[in-house]
Amino acid sequence: MTTVAEQLSTTTLLRFATAGSVDDGKSTLVGRLLHDSKSVLTDQLEAVEHASRNRGQETPDLALLTDGLRAEREQGITIDVAYRYFATARRRFILADTPGHVQYTRNMVTGASTAELAVVLVDARNGVVEQTRRHAAVAALLRVPHVVLAVNKMDLVDYAEPVFAAIAEEFTAYASELGVPEITAIPISALAGDNVVEPSAHMDWYGGPTVLEHLETVPVAHDLTACHARFPVQYVIRPQSAEHPDYRGYAGQIAAGAFRVGEQVTVLPSGRTSTIEGIDALGEAVDIAWAPQSVTLRLADDIDVSRGDLIAPSTDAPEPTQDVEATVCHVADRPLSVGQRVLLKHTTRTVKAIVKEIPSRLTLDDLSQHPTPGQLVANDIGRVVVRTAEPLALDAYADSRRTGSFLLIDPADGTTLAAGMAGRSFASTATVNTVADEEGWDF
C-alpha cells in the first residue's frame, strides 16, 4: 500500500502567486482553497472561527488563514506576502498571497519572482482597474509563464455570463499585448466557493476547469537542470587542518544547470579557466550535481576565486559587462534618478554602480513608453542603463530568471530601490578602463 509520503514524493511542485486590487478577495480565495482542499489543520480553523466571532461575524472569515499580521487582521487588508504550503493527491503547491494596495506592489514583485503561475483577481463589479494592469505588467516582466484571471464575486452580479465575458476579453487583450504566453479566465465566488474547488451550480454556462483543477493540471516546466549551468560562489572553504592541509573548495547553491567532475569551467569575471576536480555534496564526493543543490566545487588549479565570482562551463560562459540595460520595477518610496549612485546586487556579488540613463517609463493605461522621464517613483516600471564599477557576468532575464535578475540598493542605508531584469547588455571590451570620482567610486 502506498503511503501519503510516497505519493507526495512523486508529485510535481507548483509555485504560484495571487495578485489583484484592494478587496478583490485574494486572501478569501486562498483561504477557500486551503479549506475546501482539506489543507487546514483543526486548530487553525478553530483560531479563525474564534477571531471571526470576535469581529462579529457569524461564519469563519477564511481570509484570516493567510492574513497573519495583527495590522492585517485589524484593518482587513493584506500587507505582507503570506506563503502557504498545501498538497493534493495530484500536486504539491507553494503559494504566495500578495497585497493589493498600490503601496505594497513591491511585495507582489517578491511573491511573483519565483512563481510559475499567477492568479490575478478582478472584482466582477469593478472590472479591470489600474492595479490589475500593473499586476499583469509585473507578471509579464517577471516572465511568469501562466496567468489565471479569476473574475471574483460573480454572486454579486447574479452570475451573469456577459459580465464575465467582457472582463475576460479586456484583460486577455491587455495581457497578450504585454507578452503573457498563456491566459486562463475562470468565473468564481471565493466567498461562496463557486468554481474554486468544486464546480458552481450557478454558472452552467461555464464549462472550463475550477481554479484547483487548473492548478493541478497546468504544465510545469521549471527544470533548472536544462538551463545554462551557473554557480555563484557563496563562500571559500579552506580548513587548513592537519587532516586536510591543502583543501580549497568553493561553496554555494547551483543556480541553474548541472556540473560534472572533469568539466572545464571559467571563473567570472576574471576569465580564468580550470577543471572541476571534485564535487562535495552533504559531505560525500559525487560525480555530478545540479540545481538547486548546495555543493562545494574543487578545482584542479590554484586560482583566485572569491565570494561573488560566478563559475560556468567554458563552452557556455556569459560575457562580463559593466554596462547593464534592464527593465526595473521601482519598489522604494524615494525616487530613482539619473546620476544616482547605487549598489547592484547580482547573485552573491554586490558592486558599486551609477544610473547613467532612464530611457523610458511604461504607461500602464495604453502600454506606451514615456521617454526620458528623468526618474522613477514608487511602483513605476521603466528601462534603465546602469554602469557598474566592476564587470558582472549577467545573463539575459529571458534566458535565466536566477542569473538575469538583480537588485538596486541605496548605499546609505541598504534600502532596496528596484528589482531589475537584465535585457540587452553591452559587452565590455577585454581591457576595462576605470576612473574614480571624487568620492572614490571606481568606474
Image (cartoon, rainbow, N blue to C red):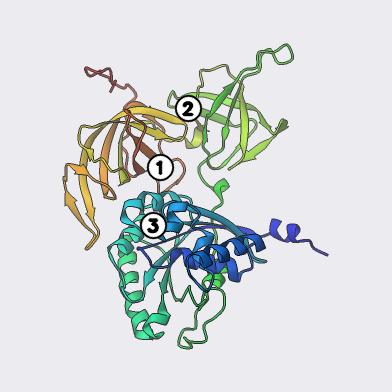
Name which residue type carries label 3: Ala
Name which residue type carries label 1: Ser
Secondary element at image label 2: loop
Most foreground residue, 307 or 26: 26
Q: Is residue 190 left or right of residue 371?
A: right
* Furthest-right residue in this view: 1
- Neighbor class of circle 3 (other Cα within 10 Å; few <14, some 14-19, many 20+) is many
Residue 158 locus on image (x, y percent): 39, 86
* Residue 257 in view here: yes
Residue 401 locus on image (x, y percent): 45, 46
**Which numbered disc flags the more N-terminal residue, 2 or 3?**
3
Q: How many angstroms separate mark 1 from mark 2 (CA)?
A: 16 Å
Using the image, determine if residue 228 lies above or below residue 263. below
Using the image, determine if residue 109 lies above or below residue 235. below
* Residue 218 in view here: no
Q: Which residue is mark 2?
A: 309
| Image quadrant where one finds the N terminus | bottom right
Name which residue type carries label 2: Asp
Q: Which residue is mark 1?
A: 405
**Which numbered disc flags the more N-terminal residue, 1 or 2?**
2
Residue 44 locus on image (x, y percent): 61, 60
Q: Is residue 199 left or right of residue 408?
A: right
**Which numbered disc flags the more N-terminal residue, 1 or 3?**
3
Q: Identify the residue shown where x is 44% and y is 51%.
A: 80
Secondary element at image label 3: helix
Q: Is residue 319 left or right of residue 210?
A: left
Q: Quadrant location of residue 128?
A: bottom left
Q: Which residue is mark 3?
A: 139
- Which circle, 2 or 3, is nearer the viewer? 3
